[in-house]
Image (tube, helix red, strand yellow):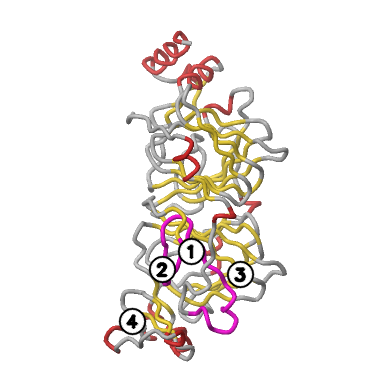
Amino acid sequence: MAEPVTLDHTAATQRLVKRSDMVACKVAFIDCKMKGSDRKENYSLIGAGVTQSEDQVVNLQESHGFSLGVAAMPPGVVNNLHVHYTAEVFMIFKGRWLFRWGANGDEGTIIGEPGDVLSIPTWIFRGFSNVGDDDGWIFSALGGDETGGLIWHPSILEQAAQHGLYLTKESVLVDTASGASMPSPGALMEPIDTTTAESLRRYSPGEMRKRMVKVDDRKWSSRALLDSVLPGHRSEMAPVVGFGMTQDRDHEPAATNPHGFTIEWLRIAPGEQVGRYTLDAKQVLIVFEGIAEIVLNEAGEEVSVRVQRQDLFSAPANVWRSIRSAGDAPLLIAVMTAGDQKKHITWAAEVVAAAAKAGFGVDHNGYVAPLRLLPFETRQTAEAFIAAE
């Protein structure tokens, strides 16, 4: 185990991104002046993502191995066809959304609603629209610290030019209508040709549906974490993308291809908690429902952070943390953890000891199992934790 990281109150609060801290950019992309797309807002919460505006505010610029942003759009607004080089995962917080894909956006559509999560494959054109009655809000996760930017559909580049907007080869947005100098032809990004666009892999609606985890699709486990067997520690997890930190060996995520991160739902009953643990990877906790109280550091050095609905907290690698449901309603968190590998939790000694007394431990593959079935050395270690209490 690596040396524990300790956060003081200032450092901890700097890793909290409240809804009130999030700053919208209305000129983040080249389609920002096109009719039907001119009212969308882009937020960069962790990393710059794929924003094309030098004016974009980034809340947390520290490298995480992934980026996290928000697409906020009123009803009827469209995000136009584009291609990503790295993973793009939509976690719908609010609104009813229609996603479309294909070289001309006509290969299929799928509807997403609050609580649904969709992982769209790389190297296909995709776009989405708010087809609901309310302002929409989607948390958007992108793989990698360097995303490579976007490939826009050639028709979007043509329409943007009519509004004086151009994109350089470095993916920098130039607004000549606002007084910026027109780039030289050699400095402009070259549009993809139609033949190449149509040669990209096709996905059927059925294939895309397998990459969406709707609310009713969540496979909750009440034994996903070692401490869930303890009084006061009622929690459940449901996997979405990759093999994250769940310790239920029967859990299988909907999307298993490399993303650069994993995503799981974590649900904690009011007044209950997940006990102290640490990971060797950065972890972002996005609160969808309820209120989270996150207590950091080792015993005697605790610092508490309160995370409200629509806020997020970024926990560094190797920092101890516990998570308590501090509201009257169940706490629902989208848990993003860096890396494609399965995450192995290190539990605090008091958690290991209490679980051992209840008859449970963790096997060598990182999954919860009856302690009596685990190797002799594992049982000895558990007994040592109990004796040290």
Is there a contact, CB below 8 Å, between mark 4 and mark 1?
no
Which residue is at the front of the view, 208 or 318? Answer: 318
**Sequence-first tag of 3 and 2:** 3
Is there a contact, CB below 8 Å, between mark 3 and mark 2?
no
Label 3 element class: strand
Q: Main secondary structure of the magenta part?
A: loop
**Sequence-first tag of 4 and 1:** 1
Amino acid at the residue labelled 2: His
Which residue is at the front of the view, 38 or 86? Answer: 38
Q: Picture coordinates of residue 97 (x, y %)?
A: 62, 67
Is there a contact, CB below 8 Å, between mark 2 and mark 1?
yes
Residue at mark 4 to residue at mark 2: CA–CA distance = 15 Å
Amino acid at the residue labelled 1: Ile
Q: Residues within 10 Å of mark 1 (few under 14, many from 20)?
A: many
> Where is mark 4, residue-wise?
189
Residue at mark 3 to residue at mark 2: CA–CA distance = 20 Å
Q: Residues within 10 Å of mark 2 (few under 14, many from 20)?
A: many
- Residue located 42% across and 27% down the image: 363
Given this view, does label 4 or label 2 mark the residue nearer the observer?
A: 4
**Sequence-first tag of 2 and 1:** 2
Amino acid at the residue labelled 3: Met
Range drawn in magenta: 31-57
Q: Picture coordinates of residue 269 (x, y %)?
A: 67, 35
> Where is mark 2, residue-wise?
84
User: Is residue 377 toward the left or the right of residue 177 in the image?
Assistant: left
Which residue is at the front of the view, 373 or 42? Answer: 42
